[in-house]
Image (cartoon, rainbow, N blue to C red):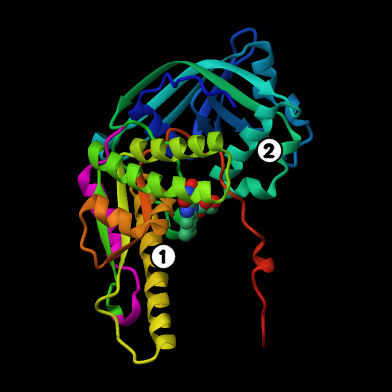
Amino acid sequence: MRTEPSILNPEETAFLVRQRVARLATADAEGNPHNIPVCFAYTPGAIYIALDEKPKDVPPTRLKRVRNIVENPSVALVADRYDEDWKLLAYLMVRGRAELVDLDAEEHKAAVRLLRGKYHQYQRMRIEENPVIAIRPERVASWGALDEPNARPQVLDAVRGRRSVRRYLDKAVPSDLVNSVLEAARWAPSPHGRQPWRFAVIAGRETKERLADAMGGEWRANLEMDGQDAEIVERRLEGSRQRLLDAPVLVLLCLYLEELDAYPDPERQKNETTMAVQSLGAAAQNALLAAYDQGLDAGWMCAPLFSPETVVKALGLDPKLIPHALLMLGYAEGDPPKRRSRLPLEDLIVYRD
Ligand SMILES: Cc1cc2nc3c(=O)[nH]c(=O)nc-3n(C[C@H](O)[C@H](O)[C@H](O)COP(=O)(O)O)c2cc1C
């Protein structure tokens, strides 16, 4: 995977990453143009396009776009938004050189992972059996309201499109978008409707540093207790710290058990707490989907669960709050490289008539 710094600015990157389709223009050696819609994945330094297996007579390498690239690697890719409200019009054009990434290249595997992470449809297609087109961006032009949200995805498309993002652009998140994310969390189902969770929003650099230092100290102690190699401990701690600092906004999800029912027996009390944790998970998923719906990306970090008291102290929170998870909010710097696939549905279900 190439990781050259992007020549796209943050607004252009955020716009491109969120598009589901673009138009690829190629030309043959005589300059005859050819232009087709394509699905693509983006990572800083490359745009990947699969040659998917389709019931065609020609092998993918005989496709016109591929022959053109071999004859003449100069290409342009356009992603655009049309709306009858012309204040929302926008487009981005990336020009660069295209090449075919062969099956035996490491980059091929990474590209297939990116494409499958972005399009669940590719999970059932044998795209790994064909070379992948890689465009190396050289010049970018953009115009219009890049920052406006795209048409909202359907709920099931958002459920499948949402992905854990761990690297973010240096691009601020408007506070009304953060509020909409929290508003969605507020509507999660909860035991007795008691909403046993509270949220802390953290955007300031110093507060993020305080939080990262506090959690890092405790994590270091735990890793050392596990007998991990000192160098690996340092590397993991630094990676996690950087992730926290680079995410534009952090939302700490805390359990708040004070208003739940009280039982005389510990078993039922434990179940009450379990229901609160289940509900926190529902609030988190609402928040993740609302973020995706609004053109943001998000990631989940479990770190606060391992040092709740330290986190409460570092942020000066009410001691009745029990930190459970951190959500990172921002704009992805590219399609995430580590999207996990899913078990087939039939492996997860038993039916009983
Ligand atoms: C309870 C929980 C804790 C998680 N903790 C972390 C974490 O600490 N760090 C991380 O990178 N991802 C974390 N994740 C994200 C998962 O790794 C991710 O959801 C999973 O790999 C599936 O990928 P996807 O979300 O992109 O579909 C967590 C997810 C859940 C539900």
Q: In this view, does 244 lie above or below 265?
A: above
Q: Name the residue under label 2.
A: 52
Residue furthest bottom as drawn? 264
Amino acid type, callout 1: Gly
Residue furthest top as drawn? 30
Confirm whether the magenta stretch covers residue 258: no
| Residue depicted at x 34% and y 90% | 263
Image quadrant occupied by the N terminus: top right
| Residue depicted at x 27% and y 36% | 172
The reply to whether residue 162 is in sight is no
Percent x, y for residue 139? 44, 14
In this orientation, which residue lies closer to the viewer: 343 or 316?
Answer: 316
Q: In which quarter of the image is residue 307?
A: bottom left
Ligand 1 has an atom within 8 Å of the beta carbon of the residue at disc 1: yes
Percent x, y for residue 128? 72, 38
Q: In which quarter of the image is residue 107?
A: top right
Q: Name the residue under label 1.
A: 281
How many residues crowd around disc 2 within 10 Å: few (fewer than 14), some, or many (20 or more)?
some
Q: What span is in magenta? A: 171-192
Q: Are marks 1 and 2 in contact (CB under 8 Å)?
A: no
How many residues crowd around disc 1 within 10 Å: few (fewer than 14), some, or many (20 or more)?
some
Image quadrant occupied by the C terminus: bottom right
Percent x, y for residue 37? 54, 33
Q: In this view, does 268 lie above or below 81?
A: below
